[in-house]
Image (tube, rainbow, N blue to C red):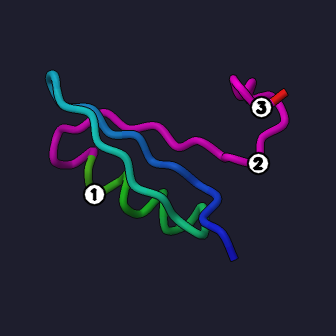
Amino acid sequence: MEKRYLLVMKFENEVLTKSFYTLKEAKITASVENENEWLTTIIDLENENIKWQGCE
């Protein structure tokens, strides 16, 4: 089983990423990071609208 969700976190000039197997895990971690003043977004890596470069 591959990790499907990517959590991107930003605080000032720092950007971190973490990967998760489930959306629930990603949402829980994002919630905790938001409380610590990080901006977060979750990306579903299986989303067909993502345009991957170099994979044609």
Instruction: Decide which of tag 1 and tag 3 comes sooner along the chain.
Output: 1
**Mark 1 or mark 2: which is in front?**
2
Q: Amino acid at mark 3?
A: Cys
Taking the spot 75% from the left edge, 24% from the top edge, the residue there is 51
- Which residue was labeled with disc 3? 55
Taking the spot 41% from the left edge, 63% from the top edge, the residue there is 28
Q: Is residue 16 above or below residue 31?
A: above
The crowd level at tag 2 (other Cα within 10 Å; few <14, some 14-19, many 20+) is few
Relative depth, front residue between 47 and 29: 47
Instruction: Decide which of tag 3 and tag 2 comes sooner along the chain.
Output: 2
Instruction: Decide which of tag 1 and tag 2 comes sooner along the chain.
Output: 1
* Left or right: 55 as drawn, with respect to 53: right
Residue 29 in the image, given as x and y percentages of width and height = 36, 60
* Left or right: 10 as drawn, with respect to 28: left
Quadrant assignment, res 32? bottom left
- Which residue was labeled with disc 2? 46
The crowd level at tag 1 (other Cα within 10 Å; few <14, some 14-19, many 20+) is few
Q: Magenta segment: does it hold 52?
A: yes
Q: Amino acid at mark 1?
A: Val
Q: Of helix, strand and loop, which one carries label 2? A: loop
Q: Main secondary structure of the magenta part?
A: loop
* Left or right: 34 as drawn, with respect to 4: left
Quadrant assignment, res 21? bottom right
Q: Which residues are magenta?
A: 34-55
- Which residue was labeled with disc 1? 32
Q: CA distance from mark 1 to mark 2?
A: 24 Å
Q: CA distance from mark 3 to mark 2?
A: 14 Å
